[in-house]
Image (spheres, helix red, strand yellow):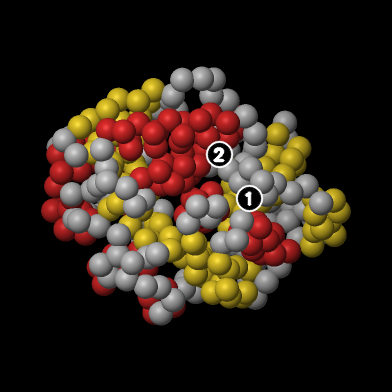
Amino acid sequence: MKLIAYGDLYTNYYFKNNLLEYISGGKSNSNILYNVADTFKTKFIGVVGNDKQGEIALLSLNNKNVDIGDIKRINESTQTIFYLDKRSTRVCPYCDRMRGYSDAYVSYKDVISKTSDDDIFVIDSLEELDLDIINNTNNKIVLYLNDINYIKRFSLNELIELLKDRCLLLCLGNKVNAFIKDKYKIDLFDFKTSINASVLISFKTVKDFDIIYLDTIEEKEIEGRIYKENMRGSLDLYIAEFLKVIIGKDIDDKVISLAHLKAAAMYIYSTTIIGERIDSLYKIRDYKECICKDISID
């Protein structure tokens, strides 16, 4: 069994007080792989740009022994997000270039040919490739939805049919929670029951979560200081730590309590630093033309 993510690799630039602090790999599905790779076998299937940013995205995963053998280099700029103090953008704040590409380079066949029936897919969207994989395989999935655009085109029955009996773990951001309740007129317990997810986590605020499992709803509060300015990717780490405990276990009160305890501790710690890959944050030592172009790192 492996945890599998797929698609484009991203690179993140992190700024503080308008100054560049670090560069590292990014995107939720690969962040989760990165943070579970010390416990489970992992593989990323996809593409990355043939540039320095792509090298860093690969280096970051390779440092944690994520299998990167099925990632192709393409002659495009790597998908890049610039995390400024109060916003994120794909446009470099130094030179106003847009980083990344719009074409889809990963197909259903690319993914399925490299996976086994007992692998678990880690998915952070419901785009065309995701739908192909969910509709044409029987693999369990870990699904993290933090954008209503991924679900608003579905009716309730369509969404239930898509996800029924598939989710080992379903995590919903606060906007997605609100959208489900408002559009479908269904509470999350009934939604979880309808799709028969093993565990559903509803992220309501930065400190308040609902965890729904079996016939239980537990309201969880994160105890400890949360540094909101550093929360980029913190929920990815929470999900990863939670998965480390529940995969391969029978879900019960004890397992859920331990999973949340460990995940909450990592969540709090992650907000004390910048970036969601704690062991793979790189400083740019030098660059040519711009920080988003030819760079060298420490």
Which element carries disc 2, helix, strand or loop?
loop
Report the side of 86 relative to 267 (left or right). Answer: right
Q: Is residue 277 visible?
A: yes
Residue 214: x percent and y percent?
19, 39
- The type of residue carrying mark 2 is Arg
Residue lying at 44% horizontally and 24% vertically, measured from the top left: 222
- Specify which label sits upstream in the sequence, 2 or 1: 1
Residue 209: x percent and y percent?
35, 30
Residue 71: x percent and y percent?
56, 72
Residue 292: x percent and y percent?
73, 56
Residue lying at 19% horizontally and 55% vertically, measured from the top left: 164
Circle on res. 232: 2
Total of numbered circles in the picture?
2
Quadrant location of the N terminus in the rendered image: bottom left
Report the side of 282 relative to 81 (left or right). Answer: right
- The type of residue carrying mark 1 is Asn
In the image, farthest residue toward the top:
224
Query: What distance separates the C-alpha of mark 2 from that of mark 1?
Result: 10 Å
Q: How would you rate the neighbour count of disc 1 (Cα within 10 Å): few for under 14, some for 14-19, many for 20 or more? A: many
Which element carries disc 1, helix, strand or loop?
strand
Task: Check the image and report above or below for 207 versus 179.
Answer: above
* Residue matched to label 1: 12
